[in-house]
Structure formats: structure tokens, C-alpha cells
């Protein structure tokens, strides 16, 4: 088997084990403590920030900075779905208007 297949199978196995481990750990609680629930609710935003921040810092143009600012303002007043939609719409239209059609 090629190296790529082993990497894919290993990644799939580790993903499955971490999900099962998380489920087993949380199933021990009758009720999830509020601090743990708050920490788990913050994970998606933390992961998104970890993935987006390096690209924004090193390669962002004006369309990206405007989209980040709009998404931040929308996130402050609305939920995550509205933030993603607003950011995507502003980024797409900003790319088209500022940088031209590619």
C-alpha cells in the first residue's frame, strides 16, 4: 500500500478514537457542568480562528480584511451562521469588485 493510504487510514482511525473517547468521557456525567459546556461551546470558534488567522495575517488583501471586519461585527450581534454568510458574501463580492474577475 502507498504511504497516502496509510496516512488516510491512520487519520480516520485517530479521528474515530477521539470521537469515541470524547463520547465515553462525557457519558460519565449525568449533567455536564456549566464550565465544561461553555468550554466545549467555544471549541468551534477557536478551531476556526486557528485555521483562518495565519492566512489573514500573512496573505490577506483588502477584500479579506473587509470581510473579517464585517464578520466580526455580525458575530458580535448575531450567531455563527449569520457571521459565516456575511463574511462569505462580503468576501465574494469584494474579490469581484476590488480585484476583478479572475
Image: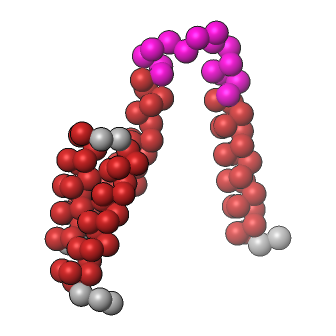
- The residue at 33%/90% (across/down) is 102
Q: Residue at x 47, y 19 (%)?
A: 36
Asked if the magenta segment contains residue 35, the reply would be yes
Give percent across and percent down for residue 99.
Answer: 22, 83
13 and 79: which is toward the camera: 79
Vertical arrangement, residue 40 with respect to residue 54, above or below:
above
Q: Is residue 101 above or below residue 71?
A: below
Is 102 left, or right, of 22 in this rendering?
left
Quadrant of the rendered image containing residue 16:
top right
Q: Main secondary structure of the magenta part?
A: helix
Q: Is residue 41 visible?
A: yes
Q: Quadrant of residue 91?
A: bottom left
Q: Residue furthest bottom?
A: 102
Q: Number of numbered discs present? A: 0
Q: Residue furthest right?
A: 1
Horizontal relation, residue 42 to residue 78: left or right: right
Q: Which residues are magenta?
A: 23-37
The answer to whether residue 75 is above or below residue 67 is: above
Residue 54 visible here: no
Return the x and y of residue 12 as percentages of the image width and height.
71, 52
> Between residues 89 and 44, which one lies in front from this camera angle?
89
Instruction: Measuring from the top left, give residue 87's x and y in whole percent.
Output: 30, 59
Q: Is residue 3 above or below residue 80?
A: below
**Coordinates of residue 61 in the picture (x, y in percent):** 20, 72
Q: Residue 55 magenta-drawn? A: no
In the picture, measured across the screen, residue 94 lies left or right of residue 14, that is left
- Quadrant that contains the N terminus: bottom right
Give me the residue at 36% from left, 57% from top.
Answer: 85
Report the colour scheme: secondary structure
Amino acid at each position: 500500500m502507498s504511504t497516502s493510504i496509510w496516512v488516510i487510514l491512520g487519520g480516520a482511525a485517530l479521528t474515530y478514537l477521539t470521537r469515541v473517547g470524547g463520547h465515553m468521557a462525557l457519558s460519565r456525567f449525568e449533567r455536564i457542568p456549566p464550565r465544561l459546556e461553555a468550554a466545549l461551546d467555544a471549541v468551534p470558534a477557536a478551531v476556526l480562528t486557528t485555521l483562518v488567522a495565519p492566512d489573514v495575517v500573512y496573505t490577506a488583501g483588502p477584500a479579506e480584511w473587509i470581510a473579517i471586519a464585517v464578520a466580526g461585527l455580525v458575530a458580535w450581534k448575531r450567531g455563527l451562521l449569520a457571521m459565516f454568510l456575511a463574511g462569505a458574501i462580503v468576501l465574494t463580492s469584494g474579490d469581484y469588485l476590488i480585484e476583478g474577475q479572475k
